[in-house]
Every structure is written in structure tokens, then in C-alpha cells.
Amino acid sequence: MIATPFPSHGRGLYQLTVSMDFAAAHCLRHYGGPCENLHGHNFAVEAVVSGKKLEPKVDILMDFKELKNRLGAVVAELDHRHLNELAVFQKRNPSSELLARYIFEGLREKLADNPQVTLQSVSVSEKASSKATYMEPGMEPAG
């Protein structure tokens, strides 16, 4: 049992995870297999943020709804699109790995006004059994 309930500065870190889906088509140039043909997926995206300090009035790191809205603004650029036609994927394949990085970089921009949180990772799954994750090692959590 904690003697003093929740001291203002714990040693730990809070982590929030939100997820959403989007549908898109892509092909992987130079793949040498069936994925070189145009095909589609219902992609699943998972974003993880962390921070040390909770907002004092409400005791939350960040509102889940707000985090999901910011992620949604980035994902909306990809939803129901042929990903190879986007400027960013004209010369590079829209692989799950590069999609995770693209979403990571877009979400990091959307979170720039919130110093309480640090974006830790973004994962993209083409199906439940496989996912690609992008993170930038060495990023120190906010706070």
C-alpha cells in the first residue's frame, strides 16, 4: 500500500496507446512476388506516446480522444488512397515500415504543441499476425 497516495513526482513513466484502421491500396515495386501487383489492405495503426507528468487538474497525460484525433488527421491522408500515387511514395515503396515512419513523422508534427508527451513509436499492420514499428532510439520522454 502506498503511504502517501501518488506523490507528485514518481520515478515512472506514463504511456498511452491509441489505434485506428485505414483502407488503402499499394504495390511494392521490385518485390519479385505477388505483392508487386496492386492490392489492398485494411491497415491497423498503433501510436504510443509517453510522459512523466500528468495534467494536474484531471490527472491524465493527454486525452485519448485528442491523441486519436491527431493520429486521425495523419491517417486521413492515406485512407482509401492508392499509396504509390502519393508524392512521398513516388520513388520509395509504401511498405509497412515506411508507412509507420510517415505516420510517425506526421504525428510528431501534430504533437509539437504538447510538451507533456513524447511520441515513442508508430506500428502499422497489414494483418493481425504481422506489424512493422518505427521509433527513434534515444528520444527522452517529456517532462
Image (cartoon, rainbow, N blue to C red):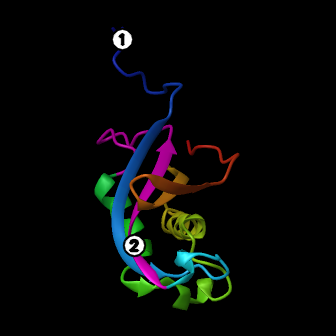
Residue 75: name its quadrant: bottom left
Mark 2 residue element: strand
Query: Does residue 131 lie above or below 86 as drawn?
Result: above
Q: Which amino acid does label 2 sit on?
A: His
Residue annotated with mark 1? 2
**Which residue is located at x 32 percent, y 52 percent?**
63
Q: Give the range drawn in magenta.
A: 38-62
Q: Do we see residue 84 in this rendering?
A: yes
In the image, residue 106 lies in the stretch drawn in magenta? no
Residue 142, x across and y down, in percent = 56, 45
Q: Do we see residue 78 in this rendering?
A: no
**Quarter of the image where the C terminus is located:** top right
Residue 46, x across and y down, in percent = 43, 56
**Which residue is located at x 49 percent, y 27 percent?**
9
In the image, residue 46 lies in the stretch drawn in magenta? yes
Q: Which amino acid does label 1 sit on?
A: Ile
Mark 1 residue element: loop
**Quarter of the image where the N terminus is located:** top left
Looking at the image, which is closer to me, 9 or 93? Answer: 93
Residue 8, x across and y down, in percent = 43, 27
- Residue 41 is marked as 2
Give the spatial CA distance, label 2 vs label 1.
47 Å
Q: In this view, does 122 lie to the left or right of 128?
A: right
Looking at the image, which is closer to me, 106 or 117? Answer: 106
Query: Does residue 27 lie above or below 99 as drawn?
Result: below
Query: Does residue 72 lie above or below 125 as drawn?
Result: below
Identify the mark nearer the N-term, 2 or 1.
1
* Residue neighbourhood size for the residue with mark 1, other residues' Cα within 10 Å, grouped as few (<14), some (14–19), many (≥20): few
Q: Is residue 18 left or right of residue 53?
A: left
**Which residue is located at x 53 percent, y 77 percent?**
34
Looking at the image, which is closer to me, 44 or 35? Answer: 35
* Eye-nearest disc, 2 or 1: 2
